Image: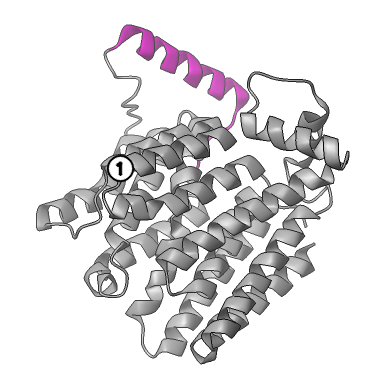
Amino acid sequence: MLYILLFIFFLTALFAMLEDRLEEQTRNVMFLVVCFLAALAAGLRPDDVDHDYLNYVSMYYEDFNIMTEVSFLFISSLVHLLFDNYIFIFIIYAFFSLALNARALKIQTDLLFLSILVFFSTYYLTHTMNQIRVAVSCGIFLCSIPYLKNGQRLKYVLMVVCATLFHYSAFVLIAAVFFRAKAMSRIEYFIWCSIIPFCYLLYMAHVDPFVMIPIPYFEKKMEAYELLQKSVGERVNPFNLVLMVKIVILYFIIWKSQLIESFNDKVYLYIKIEILSISSLLLLSNIPVVAFRINELYGVVEILLFPLVFYTIRPNWLGKAVVVAMAFVLFVINVFYNQQIFV
């Protein structure tokens, strides 16, 4: 499986380097080819490649469960009726999530191949190859970002509702409804840049702001949940190598945001969403399940944000090479260090 993924990665990287030389029609065809191959690889993957495959097989054969999303019940029932083979569950989710991501990229960026390359190195491994329901929710979220940019809050909320049908945790995306895409003032710039360092200070001081909320029932619930998490042993590592790389890239983009804005006017919106993603991981580090989920849901904006590094480096070929190298580093870390898939 690793060789297949590497083939898709380097094929996409080749198209990214040659993108300027491709005619529009050829460019679109190659983009569809890459998306199709990625969807096919995820949909037809063996059952020993990812962490969640057998869980979805079990869900397919189980009876109605009130905790199972409506969308999964509908899709699994449809698959059972038409094909009676659980493999089509993975195929449908893979193609659906890739179609949503492709649509989001087509309407928001000119850097199609660099963006799909960053996606392939990060959330393709985390979601499309593992958490297939979340993958669709994240795709819907990416498609909804233009509504935030245009101030169409109601449409954004409706999109979040659709995302929630695929994974209940997607309701947390509603918080972004208050974000604006316009350039930040000096004081806003300072405040947004300070959020992540401030969250690290809270973490190192062992201060949990949610336990400190003076609401008796909420406070007790949070304390009980933290005790449960400690007994399980799962923890957030705020100095994870991938997270450190992402923070460095984020602050570089913030530094160059005025330049980047002339090429993509959504850059400030992407920055705010990414800051929310990273800060949520730090603030909720004592509740790993919640922290990871919020971090991943908002973090998919990296697919659109990180390739913008290209605009800060000249000549063009060098800018592309830097983004390709950055994506490859993330791919290697996610595969061999974080073990998002088994190789």
Quadrant occupied by the N terminus: bottom right
Q: Position of residue 229 (x, y in %)?
A: 55, 23
Task: Report if residue 236 lies within the magenta region.
Answer: yes
Q: Is residue 83 left or right of residue 161?
A: right
Q: Position of residue 60 (x, y in %)?
A: 79, 32
Q: Is residue 110 left or right of residue 328?
A: left
Which element type, helix, strand or loop, lies under badge 1?
helix
How did the renderer colour the structure? one colour
What residue is at 69 percent from the left and 63 percent from the top? Answer: 38
How packed is label 1: few (under 14 Cα within 10 Å), some, or many (20 or more)? Answer: some
Query: Can you identify the residue that label 1 sits on?
Result: 153
Q: Which residues are magenta?
A: 215-238
Q: As displayed, is residue 294 above or below residue 8?
A: above
Quadrant occupied by the C terminus: bottom right
Task: Report if residue 130 lies within the magenta region.
Answer: no
What residue is at 80 percent from the left and 39 percent from the top? Answer: 79
Closer to the camera in the image, 248 or 48: 48
Most distant residue in the front direction: 82
